[in-house]
């Protein structure tokens, strides 16, 4: 849970991987990325920022994704 107007920071880490890693952040199962990189930062969350967030990581050969994280803006 995060309060309306507060900052939200999500970090994604990978235990193992080969080659350069590519990170992307997604909300609500969308294939279109919200952001790239291992960190997602929303400076001032709004009511439309509630939802399920996932990090996807690719090493060029395979892709993995995190379990969805439910974010609720209060």
Image (cartoon, rainbow, N blue to C red):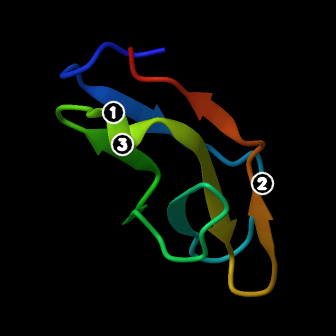
Distance (Cα) linking label 3 and label 1: 4 Å
Q: Give the residue number, with chain letter if any, for mark 2.
A: 16
Q: Label 2 vs label 3: CA separation?
A: 34 Å
Asked whether 20 or 46 is in front, the reply is 46
Mark 2 or 3 closer to N-term? 2
State the residue position of label 1: 47
- For this view, does 54 lie left or right of residue 3? right
Residue most extreme to the bottom? 61
Asked if residue 20 is positioned above or below residue 26 in the image, the reply reads: below
Circle 3 sits in a helix, a strand or a loop, which is it? helix
Q: Position of residue 18 (x, y in %)?
A: 73, 71
Total number of numbered labels?
3
Q: Residues within 10 Å of mark 1 (few under 14, many from 20)?
A: few
Horizontal side, residue 41 vs residue 32: left or right: left
Position in image of residue 60 (x %, y %)? 69, 86
Relative to 43, is 15 on the left or the right? right
In this rendering, the answer to whether 31 lies above or below 70 is below
Crowding at mark 2 (Cα within 10 Å: few <14, some 14-19, many 20+):
few
């Amino acid at each position: 849970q995060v309060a309306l107007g507060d900052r939200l920071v999500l970090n994604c880490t990978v235990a193992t991987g080969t080659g350069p890693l590519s990170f992307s952040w997604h909300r609500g199962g969308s294939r279109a990325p919200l952001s790239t990189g291992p960190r997602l930062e929303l400076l001032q969350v709004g009511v439309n920022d509630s939802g399920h967030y996932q990090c996807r990581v690719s090493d060029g050969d395979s892709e993995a994704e995190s379990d969805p994280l439910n974010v609720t803006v209060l």
